[in-house]
Amino acid sequence: MVGPGLASGRARAAASGVLLCSVALLVLTAVAHGTVPLSPSEVLDALLGKGDPVTAAIVRDLRLPRALLGVLVGGALAAAGASLQSLLQNPLADPFLLGVSGGAACGTLLASVLGVLGTAGAFLSPLAALAGALLAVVVVGLGAYSQGTLDRGRLLLSGAIVNSLASAVILLLLSIGSPDTTRGFVFWMLGSLSSASWESVSSLALYGGAGCTLLIFFSRALDAFTLGEETAHTLGIQVEQTKRCVYLGASILAAAAVAHAGIIGFVGLLVPQGVRLVVRDQRSVLVFSFLSGAVLLLSADLIARWLFSPNEISIGAVTALVGAPAFLYLMRRKV
């Protein structure tokens, strides 16, 4: 199935090109914008290793990793939300509402408090986050399963309960930490790209690539889920295996994003809703959601840095302020 607006391959290619150009333009804007504004020529010289060494260090070591991390975080959250919504056939399903993000935050914070991350924290923190996310998925599943099947009506309620539990655990861990650690983690939990580095970009690219590959592999199976689980089974789809693998792929993406940027809401909830207005097949939804999520998060980061410059607000606040009214509008259109 395809959406009414992008039925032809040429139209999809054009839309993909527009999104790619938007991502590239926002990356260049993010690199040029800051307390030290830079011209396009200065940015280009810095990227080529020319010009002032200080400017080159600002661009290559600070701003470019932050922009690329924003691309990966936004894309990962949007792709995770799109896959969960397709799997559960529920437009309200996303990593935050299902407790995945809260579990990932608990795993990351616990690993940090226990001091088990060490010098390789950029690569180990997503593993700790994934462990927390998978634990949250198991608890949510236990609460939502009824008579051997997943009760979609109880899923969001179970996710809300797990979110409350995760919040309690996070508060407990923060209360026993040092004041400096607590302040840093509070700002991190609200969503921030300020800790971006080439190590974090490489880490998220690794985990994000694994998660996206798994979801794309099962994209055709998810298309069959739109017809119902029984119909998907008659079409030869391994329903339970697909559920487990898609949950795993979405959890990897959400956990890695949370580990590097904190809890950022509405990206995984809002972006797939907008994408499904123009495309319907799952592979296109995943690709378009990834690119659109990158556009949304880069834009939110620019707003967070510009609005009260030189002070920086959390990205989560920006996405919530923009996402809540937009999501209400999209839901009204569907009614």
Image (cartoon, helix red, strand yellow):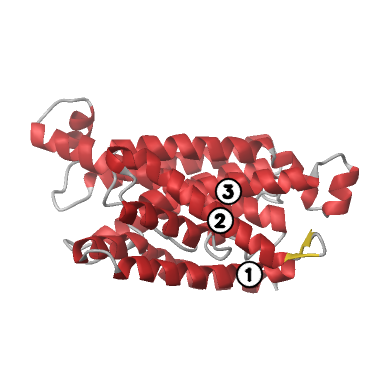
- In the figure, is residue 237 to the left or right of 142? right
Q: Give the labeled residue for mark 2.
A: 135
Q: Quadrant of residue 40?
A: top left
**For marks 1 and 3 on the same chain, the one whose residue lies earlier in the sequence:** 1
Q: Residue at x 50, y 45 (%)?
A: 291
Residue 64 versus residue 246: which sits nearer the camera? 246
Q: CA distance from mark 1 to mark 2?
A: 13 Å
**For marks 2 and 3 on the same chain, the one whose residue lies earlier in the sequence:** 2
- In the figure, is residue 206 to the left or right of 268? left
Q: CA distance from mark 2 to mark 3?
A: 14 Å
Q: Is residue 136 visible?
A: yes
The location of residue 151, given as percent across then percent down, is 76, 65
User: Is residue 123 depicted above or below 318 in this figure?
Assistant: above
Q: Residue at x 77, y 47 (%)?
A: 240
Tell me the element at label 1.
Answer: helix
Q: CA distance from mark 1 to mark 3?
A: 18 Å
Q: Give the labeled residue for mark 3.
A: 250
The location of residue 68, given as percent across then percent down, is 35, 41
Kind of residue sitting beneath label 2: Leu
Kind of residue sitting beneath label 3: Ala
Classify mark 1: residues with Cα within 10 Å, few (<14), some (14-19) or many (20+).
Answer: many
- In the figure, is residue 154 to the left or right of 44? right
